[in-house]
Image (spheres, rainbow, N blue to C red):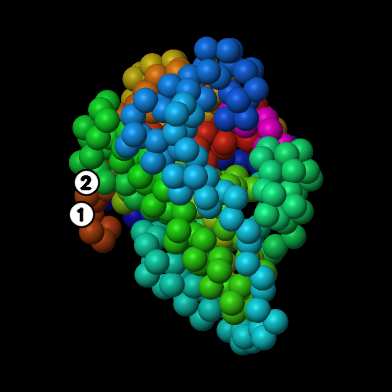
Amino acid sequence: MLTTNKVKTPRSFRIVGPQRQIDERETPHPKVDRGEFGARLRDWRKNRVGGDPFRRLFGGGGEGDPNNTLQKIMRDAPEGKVNPNQIPVDDPAEMAEQIKGVAKYLGADVVGITRLDQLYVYSHRARGNAAMGEKPGDPVNLPHRYAICLGFASDYYRYMSNNSKISDTEYQFGNNHAIVPTFMLASYIREMGYPATAHHHGRSLVNPIPLAINAGLGELGRHGMLIHEKYGSRLHLTVVTTDLPLAVDEPVDIGVEEFCKYCKKCARTCPSHSIPFGEKGILNGVEKYLVNIEMGNPLNSATRSGAFRPPIPLIAAGVGAKRRWRFCHSLRVNRVSSVFFISWFS
């Protein structure tokens, strides 16, 4: 029997030294676009995915028109103005529950709230936004106090078809499905009279995984991704940052720390051998399992999008405190999660 416990600090990683903010230009996709993983991978990213009309709905190069993709449209959309008629908040705890209810109504499966740690905000942006007067390389200024972390679960059985176009499409659809609810939640908060910014697959200025862990959505696995007690690693993570007064959640202990010490199935099945078998290491002031992104990301990107889905444990079946935890062949490192590898592991 496994139980979920609230804890003051996460158990699956420890802050043991000084950390630095990460420049978004250091993350995988900008590196691929610059050719730092080789010309072949850069050309594939810009051209190869254009051969399939359905695949082009989710973005990519080649013959497709980027204006036919939701990702491109939402990436370039301007942020709405804050309503000058601010609604007062007398009870941050009550407001937090209201925001969680709205987020779930809009489509989120899980929601948690934490304080926005500036260490998990990028120092500089990799992509510009002409509508907002932003250029690549501009410093990021995101002085919000809170981070609302949203998780959107992909379909278990479609992911179980891995490695196939069905599982690939489910992953891409999940990324796009999360964009609109995140945008709408930020818009709702701005209409309440408080600044809010949406961070999703179209654009993101924050690192969602450590924020989600601090918000109580799960723990950090050996594979460097969030593990949720019900959905495992099938969550697409987005964030809304805001100054709306909110009560925050606490991290949780669902047993991942002990489980990952002995399981190691992700390390055994990782095709690029990027996931370690050994003990934790320290990088950028964080003690955790050190995934080798320089090995993993090129393989993941050079094949079709389902290349890196090692079997990962901790997909809970059942309700309440009684859970049967089983292995799940349904993990894909999504864009936002791959950003996490660079942010914490290099």
Give the numbered dot on residue 324: 2
Q: Could you say which quadrant of the image residue 330 lies in?
A: top left
- Per the image, the residue denoted by label 1 is 318
Task: Look at 49% across and 29% down and name the residue there.
Answer: 61
Residue 9 appears in the rendering: no
Q: Is residue 185 above or below residue 162?
A: below
Above/below status of 223 relative to 107 = above
Amino acid bearing label 2: Arg
Q: Residue 69's spot in the image, x, y percent?
A: 45, 44
Which residues are drawn in magenta?
20-28
Lateral position of residue 328 relative to residue 30, left or right: left
SS of the residue under disc 2: strand
In percent of width and height, residue 341 lies at 56, 32
Residue situated in front as seen by the camera: 225 or 236: 236
Whether residue 167 appears in this view of the structure is yes
Q: Nearer the viewer, residue 159 or 33?
A: 33
Q: Position of residue 175 (x, y in %)?
A: 42, 45
Q: Is residue 22 magenta?
A: yes
Q: Which element carries disc 1, helix, strand or loop? A: loop
Q: Earlier in the sequence, mark 2 or mark 1?
A: 1
